[in-house]
Image (cartoon, grey):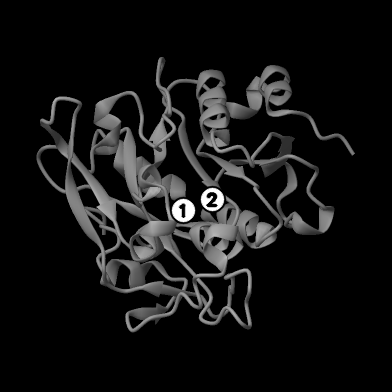
Amino acid sequence: MSHPTLAEFLKDSPDRLIKGPIAILLIEDGVAVGPTLNHHLKAGFKLILALSPDPLPPHLLPEDGGEKIVNLRHDARNTRAHVAAVNAVIEAAPPNTWMYYGYNAEFLFYPFSESRTVGEMLAFHTEERRRSMLTYVIDLYAPDLNRFPDAVSMNEAMFDRTGYFALGRTDRDGNFLERQLDFHGGLRWRFEEHVPADRRRIDRISLFRTQPGLKLLADHRFNVEEYNTYSCPWHHNLTAAVASFRVAKALARNPGSRHQIQNFAWRNSHPFRWHSQQLMDFGLMEPGQWF
């Protein structure tokens, strides 16, 4: 079975990028690959680029994926894999194409995502003259590491219901940047001694619209400062959330942390219901003016 590289696909099939929104999913390991692909397929993405070092087994691909899911070869395990992949697709896609990027075992939620497609949501966001959308990466984890040693459980997922906060973001000269904040919380906050300082933020600009010269940076921000803002100047805008097992997996797997962490569950753990309303109820995403 053919497993072309991302570069080959972008060169040979530029017509596939004409209609968005497009999802770029970096497959780092074999955890929850099928559910990840299926979740974003149901969200309504027109094209899903599943990037993996090796071909994905056919049984992991949703049966109704058809030509919407394309498995491409890419070193998704590299720490800067997201930078190379996203910037390559930005350069190849037409201007003003909406894109999303994430990893396996991560699930995009946006307000009313159970009944409205991601395309409908982004159409409204475009009408509000926004070219990007802030997403909060909400850490998911299994309730018991003895039963789930990889820290992943789709059926019994937990998340932190409190402990989220924001700090003002400054430039190199110490001046506060307008409408930009550094958000913290979840496992990165509770186990910060095991997380490098430059990876402790939970904000990510996961949804964005392409334009010439746009570049994703290693810290999940963009080289155009307006893309990194949480809202426009005149009112609150939509935000979304990425429910993610990624940090839990890493903490349970890495030699420096796996023997020091007995469990992720604590007094403020709460069952994750896999529903956008729960995330809005806890203030983890904002519907803005969209009802």
> Mark 2 = which residue?
44
Residue farthest to the right, as pictured: 1
From the viewer's perspective, tell me whether residue 173 is left or right of residue 49.
Answer: left
Residue placed at 25% from the left, 33% from the top? 129
The correct choice, above or below, for 119 with respect to 281 in the image is above
- Mark 2 Cα shell of 10 Å, populated few (<14), some (14-19), many (≥20): many
From the viewer's perspective, tell me whether residue 289 is left or right of residue 109.
Answer: left
- Do callouts 1 and 2 mark residues in contact (Cβ within 8 Å)? yes
Q: Nearer the viewer, residue 18 or 78?
A: 78
| Kind of element beneath mark 2 | loop
Image x and y of residue 55, in percent: 80, 43
Residue 283 location, quadrant: bottom left
Q: Earlier in the sequence, mark 1 or mark 2?
A: 2
Q: Nearer the viewer, residue 185 or 242?
A: 185
Q: Please give the count of numbered marks on the rendered protein.
A: 2
> Mark 1 = which residue?
117
Image x and y of residue 19, in percent: 55, 32
Residue placed at 64% from the left, 23% from the top? 15
Q: Is residue 258 visible?
A: yes
The correct choice, above or below, for 30 with respect to 278 in the image is above
Q: Amino acid at mark 2?
A: Gly
Image x and y of residue 279, in percent: 34, 67
